[in-house]
Amino acid sequence: MIAFITSFRARALARDWDHHVLLLERSVRSMLAQTRGEFYVVVACHEIPDTLLAQEPRVHFLPVEFLPTNQNNDDMCVDKVLKLSAGAAWARAQGCEYVVFNDADDLVSNRIAGFVADHRGENGWYCPCEMFYTHGGRFMRFFDIPAPAAGPCVIVRASLLQFTKPPFSGAWTELVIANGESNYLGLLGRRGEVVNTLAAVGLEHYREYMTNGGHPLKPLPFPANVIINHHDSTSFVSGG
């Protein structure tokens, strides 16, 4: 069993809530379109949207109790990390063998669950390439992601996940600080919540963090997701 985990933006942080609900529905339907394998979809959120997905038995909406963050890039990254962390903890408690982190506005390949089922026991996989699409456009672009970064979709064996609470320390914090993200790390610590360290290091360090910990990830042999760029993407908020 694998769990696709995504974080859904709070209504208070969305310029267009209905637009985000639409993107979430498309994203989750791409997860549900897996051709083989057993899986859950976990949506960590502040509010459960009015959607037929709430009636889908393979989809679990996981409400979080912490307050929404401010509407700037660092704070919204904190929001995302805390939601992914909550989803990862829930998935592991349900006995899921693998977790997949994916953004709530992106699409995923329908081959992921079957591929994981055929390669059980591996540490996990990162995305060395991705397809990029601007919402409302006519074309997608395909490009390789330069090392050491990876795409936002990452697959990891659940038993390798580590969780911690502030005050933070360890190799993962050194990677974050080295990337010039001390402000984000401080905001994350002030929340006082349990954090999954893989989610916290982010896509810039998925590969390096797992390799340094003795559990290197392998590249997926096919494009795993389509990045959806749109008018309310996090990259367009202050600091993005």
Image: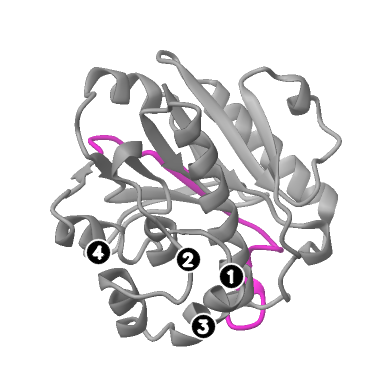
Q: Which mark sits nearer the N-terminus, 4 or 1?
A: 4
Q: Are marks 1 and 2 in contact (CB under 8 Å)?
A: yes
Q: CA distance from mark 3 to mark 4?
A: 28 Å
Residue at 27 percent of width and 50 percent of height: 128
Q: CA distance from mark 3 to mark 2?
A: 12 Å
Q: Which mark is residue 146?
A: 4
Q: Residues within 10 Å of mark 1 (few under 14, many from 20)?
A: few
What residue type is disc 4 on?
A: Pro
Q: CA distance from mark 4 to mark 2?
A: 31 Å
Q: Which mark is residue 192?
A: 1
Q: Which mark is residue 186?
A: 3
Q: Is residue 138 visible?
A: no
Q: Which residues are magenta?
A: 220-240
Residue at 44 percent of width and 86 percent of height: 182
Q: Which mark sits nearer the N-terminus, 1 or 2?
A: 2
Residue at 65 percent of width and 30 percent of height: 60
